[in-house]
Image: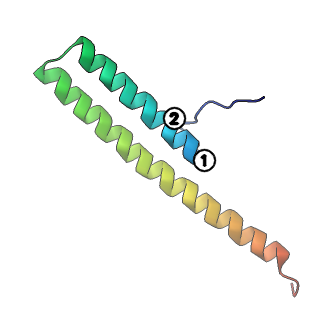
Amino acid sequence: MHVRLPSVRHPHTFYDVFGVVAAAVAIMALVLAVRYGEVIRLEMAVFIAVVFLWAGWAIERILSETTERSRRQRQRDWPWK
């Protein structure tokens, strides 16, 4: 069985986005469990904001690639072309 790690640069599926966000939340929880201070909380807030901005970008990219792939598939399947 082939298992592919989540891709940050070129996300292809929902599982890429879910894997990265889950890892980021786990890292944030671990850091906050070990150190808890005003600066750390601010850093974690910025970190999670960046992760969620990345997730929005990744979802937009996945949807646009899917739309383009669907359009190419429909053009190829048109019988009158």
Residue type highlighted by circle 2:
Gly
Residue 48: where, in percent of width, then height? Answer: 31, 36
The residue sitting at 11% across, 23% down in the picture is 38
In the depicted structure, whether residue 75 falls above or below residue 1? below
Single out the residue that lies furthest toward the left: 38
Residue 58: where, in percent of width, then height? Answer: 49, 49
- The quarter holding residue 69 reads bottom right
Residue type highlighted by circle 1:
Thr
Residue 5 - label: none
The residue sitting at 49% across, 53% down in the picture is 59
The residue pinned by badge 2 equals 19
In the depicted structure, whether residue 55 falls above or below residue 72? above
Residue 39: where, in percent of width, then height? Answer: 15, 22
Image quarter (top left, top right, bottom left or bottom right) of the N terminus: top right
The residue pinned by badge 1 equals 13
Mark 1 or mark 2: whose residue is earlier in sequence? 1
The residue sitting at 42% across, 51% down in the picture is 56
| Secondary structure of residue under mark 1 | loop
| Gap between marks 1 and 2 measured at Cα | 10 Å
Residue 9: where, in percent of width, then height? Answer: 55, 39
Residue 22 appears left or right of 3: left
Camera-nearest residue between 1 and 7: 1
Residue 77 appears left or right of 34: right
Tag 1 near tag 2, CB within 8 Å: no
Single out the residue that lies furthest toward the top: 34
The residue sitting at 58% across, 34% down in the picture is 6
